[in-house]
């Protein structure tokens, strides 16, 4: 079955006209509302609060002196509750080397902290903890 093709001479005037969507990203033009990032649900915020409370009690009890002084700023889902972004702050007289040392100590203690945080909250699967040091 053949298809009738439009002659090239008829297409040229159409290409010369500018429309509102010309020059825009086609991905944005065809974007659907269900592809938008969702707001955190009440349950996700509740989980983040429980994990933040658990971390505030876990970190001072660790044997590592570097981690004992950290302050928990926030816990947010990143991008969902299977992975949580934990923002921690180093006490004020901090140096650039202090941030790298804190990151190393957090990476070494992540599994133990995650295990204790999971014991403090009641959830079938423990969320992965991702650290952001400020």
Image (tube, rainbow, N blue to C red):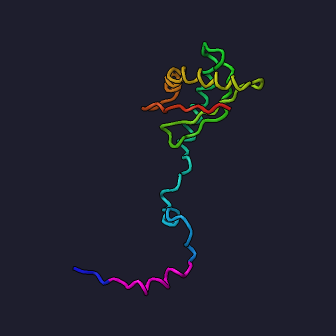
Residue at left offset 49%, top offset 33%: 127
Residue at left offset 52%, top offset 56%: 36
Please identify the residue farthest to the right as the structure is shown. Answer: 93
Residue 90, compared with residue 29, is above or below; it is: above
Q: Is residue 62 magenta?
A: no
User: Closer to the camera, 73 or 20?
Assistant: 20
Q: Looking at the figure, which quarter contains the N terminus?
A: bottom left
Please identify the residue farthest to the front as the structure is shown. Answer: 9
Q: Does the magenta stretch include residue 17?
A: yes
**How would you classify the magenta stretch by its main secondary structure?**
helix
Residue at left offset 66%, top offset 15%: 65
User: Closer to the camera, 37 or 13?
Assistant: 13
Q: In this view, does 81 lie to the left or right of 64?
A: left
Please identify the residue farthest to the top as the structure is shown. Answer: 63
Residue at left offset 57%, top offset 36%: 85
Query: Which region shows up in magenta?
Result: 5-18
Q: In this view, does 50 lie to the left or right of 97?
A: left
Residue 128 screen position, x and y as percent: 49, 32
Residue 14 screen position, x and y as percent: 49, 83
Residue 133 screen position, x and y as percent: 65, 31
Q: Looking at the figure, which quarter contains the C terminus?
A: top right
Q: In this view, does 97 lie to the left or right of 118?
A: right
- Place residue 51 in its image quadrant: top right
Residue 10, compared with residue 87, is above or below; it is: below
Number of numbered tags placed on the structure image: 0
Residue 15 screen position, x and y as percent: 50, 80
- Place residue 106 in its image quadrant: top right
């Amino acid at each position: 079955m053949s298809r009738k093709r439009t002659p090239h001479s008829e297409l040229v005037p159409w290409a010369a006209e500018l429309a509102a969507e010309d020059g825009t990203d086609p991905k944005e033009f065809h974007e659907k509302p269900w592809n938008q990032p969702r707001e955190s649900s009440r349950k996700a915020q509740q989980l983040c609060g429980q994990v933040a409370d658990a971390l505030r009690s876990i970190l001072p009890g660790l044997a590592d002196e570097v981690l004992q002084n950290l302050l928990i700023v926030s816990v947010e889902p990143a991008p969902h509750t299977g992975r949580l972004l934990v923002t921690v702050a180093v006490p004020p007289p901090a140096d650039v080397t202090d941030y790298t040392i804190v990151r190393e100590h957090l990476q070494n203690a992540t599994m133990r902290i995650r295990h204790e945080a999971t014991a403090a909250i009641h959830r079938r699967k423990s969320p992965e903890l991702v650290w952001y040091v400020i």
